[in-house]
């Protein structure tokens, strides 16, 4: 089977599974699921959320670190309950989703582990930029923009893991994908998988829609979340916050269109981009 | 005069563009498709082409490709409703200066046309009347509220804190000459920074449900010249390091005290202006702080005068003239300052000549230590 034909078959299999809901998409950890259920209620009692968080040491540590960092680094002895109160329900929800999504970008397979980590850094960069842009534009939900940016490429590590499984289960003499073919399959299916994950995780509809729309600008709805994520994606790539190679001219075209579409001047873009790598490193460490 | 060709199949778009360019003093020609556009280019040397993408007969990308094939390097700005990355990517490869998505605002057209013509003007090819009307760099006034050339109001300090009483406390500790705005929410804060220009922005690091660092970065993007200060509780030794790591320029600690606010003002508003030195002359600037801050002011001024006199002595000056007309005269402090300065000048081998108000003159003439210092009274 030629690589091209194989590519088509794989693509079709993955898309069919997504359509029939038979693709194995990572679930949210139990604690995260229950916390998010509680946090859907605007009048949520944060003490209940704190009790759940205490059962997940990784999540608990992350919340504490963010809460103490927000207070200028001091007061390291605060409780989980104080941390959740200090952060507020929206920040807690974002942190839980952040921590859950990061798990998907961790791989034990040496072939994709490093790329997946870099892809997570890219996602953080897109998330930070999207949040800033949404806030600056003033008409969008900045936290939804952050989530959409964070999740926009979540389909890539999932697609990569599926390909690795297929490779292991097949006759190696017939199943030989070049690096380019690999990327082509992942590029061709990741957005669909990302949308399926967003639906499974019950992310807000605006976030799911933004992931669906983030490959191309929609000029009929200039200040849409999808446009913001699409633009941030190109900025992050041009800041070299992306694993592997990418079409630089394509990213520059997106930057040029997005600047006019969103009505941004060069100073604002330069300010948002400067220090982005440092911010990503800080977020990654948090 | 700069000359621009507009190629667009929409008569309405052409007439809007032409009217605006003419208003800015730019000469214009029009063409309704790529074929007619190329004909115009054969006849006239333009400074810029504004080019649509989708047109009958010959579309924009084809016209651009033919221009470049023929060696025509006239700058091109795409003005189109086409936003597809693949199409824009293709025309980018052929060489365009920038891109404007329809419908567009006149300011965007003006800014992008100006930029191209200005770049040309720098090369000497064409004078740019449009470039001449672009906004001048924003220079904030020394203090108080004013108006930026673009119409945005200048304000000295902006504080974002969810507690109203923190705003009130800060206002009560600031000198009257320092203007201040305040906001309790992130959304309102971003609205205000879109409308005004601030010198110093203070962001509370514990606003419920708000990521303060993210908010600060967003404000910074809209206020690139403002100094960013984190408002933090004094509960940690490394708050300053943390704030710097997060991208702040400094920290103001809560609870707010007169001393902390005076330090803030001194650090970001008048330290650099406390004394102006030129050659062997010094001029004391007007004091903008509060009465309670005068001790610290005199102490800093004394330090500055002595350190600048040392530099003068090292530069082989044999005298120093000090204009103290704007010195706030408080007898004990003023006398101590002058005595210290005269003694230090004597040690450095500098002759001192003072200038100041008649009040200061009478004060100094009545004391043995200062009576002999040459003094010129000014109103």
Image (cartoon, coloured by chain):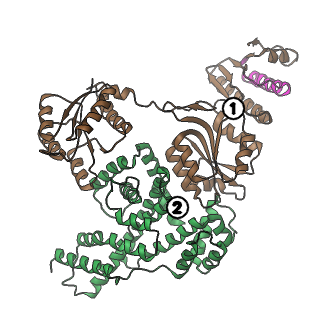
Chain colours: A green, B brown
Residue B349 located within the stretch drawn in magenta = yes
Residue drawn at x 40%, y 59% as measured from the top left: A229
Residue drawn at x 31%, y 32% as measured from the top left: B119
* Viewer-proximal residue among A188 and B328: A188
Please report, as a chain letter, where disc 1 is located: B
Highlighted magenta segment, given as a residue range: B326-351
**Quadrant of the rendering where the C terminus of chain B is positioned:** top right
Q: Residues within 10 Å of mark 2 (few under 14, many from 20)?
A: few
Question: Please, is residue A109 above or below residue B210 in the view?
Answer: below
- A91 on left or right of B4: right
List the residue tagged with mark 1.
B177
Question: Pointer 2 and pointer 1: residues touching (CB < 8 Å)?
Answer: no
**Quadrant of the rendering where the N terminus of chain B is positioned:** top left
- B341 on left or right of B240: right
Residue drawn at x 59%, y 52% as measured from the top left: B244
List the residue tagged with mark 2.
A282
Element under disc 2: helix
* Viewer-proximal residue among A100 and A12: A12
Residue B356 located within the stretch drawn in magenta = no
Residue A283 visible, this angle: yes
Quarter where residue B324 is shown? top right
Farthest residue to the front: give it.
Answer: B12
Element under disc 1: loop
- A273 on left or right of B376: left
In percent of width and height, residue B197 lies at 55, 38
In percent of width and height, residue A7 lies at 21, 75
Q: Which mark is residue A80?
A: none
* Viewer-proximal residue among B126 and B268: B126
Quarter where residue B297 is shown? top right
In percent of width and height, residue A54 lies at 63, 78
């Amino acid at each position: 089977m030629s690589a091209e034909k194989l590519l088509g078959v794989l693509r079709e299999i993955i898309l069919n599974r997504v359509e029939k809901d038979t693709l194995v998409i990572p679930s949210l950890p139990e604690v995260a699921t229950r916390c998010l259920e509680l946090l859907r209620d605007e009048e949520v009692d944060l003490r209940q959320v704190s009790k759940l968080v205490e059962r997940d040491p990784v999540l608990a540590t992350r919340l504490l670190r963010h809460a103490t960092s927000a207070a200028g680094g001091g007061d390291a002895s605060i409780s989980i309950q104080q941390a959740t109160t200090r952060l507020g329900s929206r920040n807690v929800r974002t942190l839980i989703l952040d921590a859950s999504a990061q798990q998907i970008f961790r791989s034990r397979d040496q072939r994709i582990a490093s790329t997946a980590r870099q892809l997570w850094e890219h996602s953080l960069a897109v998330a930070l930029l999207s949040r800033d842009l949404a806030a600056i534009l003033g008409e969008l939900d900045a936290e939804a923009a952050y989530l959409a940016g964070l999740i926009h490429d979540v389909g890539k590590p999932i697609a990569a893991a599926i390909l690795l499984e297929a490779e292991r289960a097949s006759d190696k003499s017939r199943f030989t994908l070049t690096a380019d073919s690999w990327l082509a399959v992942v590029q061709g299916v990741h957005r669909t998988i990302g949308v399926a994950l967003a639906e499974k995780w019950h992310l807000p509809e605006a976030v799911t829609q933004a992931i669906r729309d983030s490959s191309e600008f929609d000029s009929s709805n200039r200040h849409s979340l999808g446009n913001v994520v699409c633009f941030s994606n190109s900025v992050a790539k041009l800041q070299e916050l992306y694993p592997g190679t990418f079409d630089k001219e394509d990213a520059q075209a997106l930057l040029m269109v997005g600047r006019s579409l969103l009505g941004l001047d060069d100073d604002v873009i330069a300010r948002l981009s400067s220090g982005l790598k440092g911010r990503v490193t800080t977020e990654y460490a948090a | 005069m700069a000359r621009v060709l507009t190629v667009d199949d929409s008569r309405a778009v052409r007439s809007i563009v032409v009217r605006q360019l003419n208003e800015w003093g730019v000469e214009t020609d029009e063409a309704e498709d790529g074929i007619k556009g190329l004909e115009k280019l054969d006849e006239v040397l333009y400074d810029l082409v504004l080019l649509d993408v989708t047109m009958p007969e010959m579309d924009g990308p084809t016209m651009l490709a033919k221009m470049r094939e023929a060696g025509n390097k006239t700058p091109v700005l795409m003005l189109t409703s086409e936003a597809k990355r693949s199409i824009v990517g293709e025309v980018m490869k052929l060489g365009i200066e920038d891109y404007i998505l329809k419908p567009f605002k006149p300011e965007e057209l003006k800014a992008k046309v100006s930029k191209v013509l200005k770049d040309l003007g720098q090369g000497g090819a064409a004078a740019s009347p449009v470039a001449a009307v672009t906004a001048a760099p924003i220079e904030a006034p020394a203090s108080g509220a004013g108006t930026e050339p673009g119409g945005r109001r200048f304000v000295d300090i902006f504080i974002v804190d969810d507690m109203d009483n923190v705003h009130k406390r800060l206002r009560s500790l600031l000198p009257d000459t320092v203007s201040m705005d305040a906001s309790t929410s992130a959304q309102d804060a971003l609205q205000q920074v879109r409308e005004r220009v601030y010198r110093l922005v203070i962001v509370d690091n514990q606003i419920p449900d708000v990521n303060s660092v993210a908010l600060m970065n967003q404000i910074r993007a809209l206020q690139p010249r403002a100094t960013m200060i984190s408002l933090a509780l004094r509960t940690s030794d490394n708050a300053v390091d943390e704030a710097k790591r997060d991208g702040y320029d400094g920290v103001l600690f809560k609870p707010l005290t007169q001393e902390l606010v005076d330090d803030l003002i001194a650090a970001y508003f008048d330290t650099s202006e406390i004394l102006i030195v030129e050659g062997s002359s010094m001029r004391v600037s007007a004091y903008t702080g509060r009465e309670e801050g005068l001790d610290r002011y005199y102490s800093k001024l004394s330090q500055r005068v002595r350190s600048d006199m040392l530099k003068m002595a090292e530069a082989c000056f044999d005298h120093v003239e000090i204009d103290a007309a704007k010195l706030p005269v408080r007898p004990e402090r003023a006398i101590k300052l002058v005595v210290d300065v005269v003694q230090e000048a004597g040690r450095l081998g500098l002759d001192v000549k003072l200038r100041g108000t008649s009040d200061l003159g009478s004060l100094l003439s009545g004391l043995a230590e200062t009576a002999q210092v040459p003094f010129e009274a000014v109103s």
